[in-house]
Image (cartoon, rainbow, N blue to C red):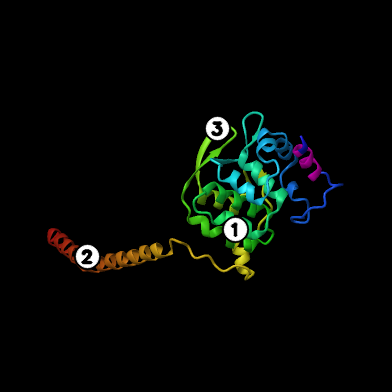
Amino acid sequence: MAHHADAKRALDERGYKGQLVRGDNPLKLFEKPVRDRIVDSYYWKEQCFGLNAATLLDRATELSFVGGTYGVAQRPTPFLCLAFKLLQIVPDKEIILFYLEQEEYKYLRVLAAFYIRLAWEKDEEVYATLEPYLTDSRKLKRRTREGWALTYVDDFIDDLLLKSRVCATTLPKINPRLFLEDEDRLEPRISALGGELEELDGEDEEEDESNGEVEEVNGPVNGREHEADGSDEEMVGG
């Protein structure tokens, strides 16, 4: 109960003196109905009690699926509870990057990515930090309201950068990448498929050239056929 009261106190505007994210209490990045479900949930009360940035790592490595809320009662997933706890702790960026870089724990990685998209305020920093992980094609289990679905790490990262709502959470607005490039705040992104695309373009050019040669060869032949046809008609007509 003490932990429950502590969470309520963190959401009380009169008593909040912690770090601000986007100029406000970071816990308010989650909508009130979701916040209420989290602090009332069993997982929050039993598994998130007294967690700090180090001990939260142990919980995060135990995650086995992502998701927001599920079921008729819209219960919060452990993933969402731990993201909420991160917003309560507001760890240093170095710690979040450490989470993100852990190759062995894919759910820890996407948890860190979700937090970055929520809490980091510079759009170009969000893109530059998350885009390298668009090459991570490992599978993820996702808990939905109705059941289960399959997704991938790169798809989850892509959703964070392109969608306005992920895991029952409305994400802060982010400028499109092209806008940031036009503002010289971000370098143009080099696709990981760039080399393969260049090879395909080369193959297409070679194919076009070979088709052109065939047309040149066929052209005069067809012309001669027409001439022959014409002469035959004249002969018939004569």
State the quadrant of the N terminus: top right
Is tag 1's residue or tag 3's residue first in the polypeptide sequence?
Answer: 1
Is tag 3's residue or tag 2's residue first in the polypeptide sequence?
Answer: 3
Q: Which residue is mark 2?
A: 218
Q: Nearer the viewer, mark 1 or mark 3?
A: 1
Q: Is residue 168 visible?
A: no
Amino acid tagged 3? Gly
State which quadrant residue 40 falls in: top right
Q: Is residue 72 left or right of residue 151?
A: right
Q: Which residue is mark 1?
A: 97
Amino acid tagged 2? Asn
Q: Which residue is mark 3?
A: 147
Q: Crowding at label 1, few (<14), some or many (≥20) Cα neighbours within 10 Å?
A: some
- Per the picture, the main secondary structure of the magenta-coloured stretch is helix
| Residue ID at (58%, 54%) | 99
Mark 3 element type: loop
Look at the image and give the residue range highlighted in magenta: 3-10
Amino acid tagged 1? Leu
Question: What distance separates the C-alpha of mark 1 from that of mark 3?
Answer: 31 Å
User: In the rendered structure, are the residues bearing label 1 and label 2 in contact, judged by CB atoms less than 8 Å apart?
Assistant: no
| Residue ID at (52%, 56%) | 133
Q: Crowding at label 2, few (<14), some or many (≥20) Cα neighbours within 10 Å?
A: few
Q: Nearer the viewer, mark 1 or mark 2?
A: 1
